[in-house]
Amino acid sequence: MTARADVVARLTGRAVSGERPLSRGLAEVTLDDGRVVVVKRSGEPGAARAEAAGLRWLAASGSVRVPDVHGHEEGWLVIDRVAQGRPGREAAVRFGRDLAALHAAGAPAFGAPPPDGPADAYIGLAPMRNEPGTDWPRWYAGQRVLPYLRRAVDQGTIRAGEAVVVERVCERLPGLAGPAEPPARLHGDLWSGNVLWAADGQVWLIDPAAHGGHRETDLAMLHLFGCPHLERVLEGYQEVAPLAGGSAERVGVHQLFPLLVHAVLFGRGYAERALAVARTALAG
């Protein structure tokens, strides 16, 4: 029995009848009762724990659909597989409504981690510190934008002189943020690859970087990397929880965080996009 199969057997209580590697650190494992689970292996301390806690916190909202978590240990995470289907317009509207309900479930504070989740979590492969705060503009600047800006500068992806434009956005955030809102329960890494259009006609979410934040940040991620039937998703969202006026002009402000994360992980192209978004925000 492989180490992966051994972990699955312990966490599911079932024997393993087959394994199919999908990519590095990711595989599908078939149990002896015919069910299929997904097994992830992370080399980062705490990543499996953070993802498991995030999935359970999203599930506890009773809104969005997420895979059941069988457990985690020593960097391994075992969850149910979601059988994939094709995007649909009706499913998109339902997803928008469900996403609004997830956000409305709330969080204790901006930056609050899920219950049993570590403060030192991850967004993709990048470390993400969940340090609670009460004022969104100050928290977003200090805990989400500036840490990744500093890392991008330190590694040479953004030049020190260029960083000033992002720093100015942070200084002006109280005036750019729109009306104050309570902390929302965020997926936190809501790009299209983490939105699964399933064979059951529903939308399922995977790979969260869950925390308390501003609901427009999740929506900005959908805009940034594209999402099938995005207009229908937003239509369903607005039916349940209309956005405050001027939300379209704030999309770039909320995209600064994921763009800087991607700049740190993937280089100059994303840095240039982050700088362009910052300049547009200041010009507006």
Image (tube, rainbow, N blue to C red):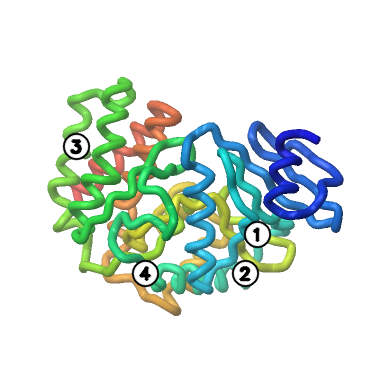
Does label 1 or label 3 sit earlier along the sequence?
A: 3
What's the residue type where badge 4 is placed?
A: Gly
- For label 2, the SS is helix
Residue 131 visible, this orientation: yes
Q: Residues within 10 Å of mark 4 (few under 14, many from 20)?
A: many
Q: Residues within 10 Å of mark 2 (few under 14, many from 20)?
A: many
Does label 2 or label 3 sit earlier along the sequence?
A: 2
Mark 2 and mark 1 residues within 8 Å of each other at the beta carbon: yes
- For label 4, the SS is loop
Total marks placed: 4
Does label 4 or label 2 sit earlier along the sequence?
A: 2
Q: Which residue, given by chain and number where applicable, does mark 3 sit on? A: 165
| Image quadrant assignment for residue 246 | bottom left
Q: Residues within 10 Å of mark 3 (few under 14, many from 20)?
A: some
Name the spot of residue 284 as percent of width and height, x first: 20, 52
Name the spot of residue 277 as percent of width and height, x first: 30, 43
Q: Is residue 3 above or below residue 99?
A: above
Q: Which residue, given by chain and number where applicable, does mark 4 sit on? A: 106
Q: CA distance from mark 4 to mark 1?
A: 25 Å
What's the residue type where badge 1 is placed?
A: Trp
Q: Which residue, given by chain and number where applicable, does mark 2 sit on? A: 91
Name the spot of residue 206 as percent of width and height, x first: 57, 54
The residue positioned 39% from the left and 73% from the top of the image is: 104
Does label 4 or label 1 sit earlier along the sequence?
A: 4
What's the residue type where badge 3 is placed?
A: Val
- For label 3, the SS is helix
> 209 or 119, which lies in front?
119
Does label 3 or label 4 sit earlier along the sequence?
A: 4
Q: CA distance from mark 2 to mark 3?
A: 39 Å
Q: Which residue, given by chain and number where applicable, does mark 1 sit on? A: 197
What's the residue type where badge 2 is placed?
A: Ala
Mark 1 and mark 3 residues within 8 Å of each other at the beta carbon: no
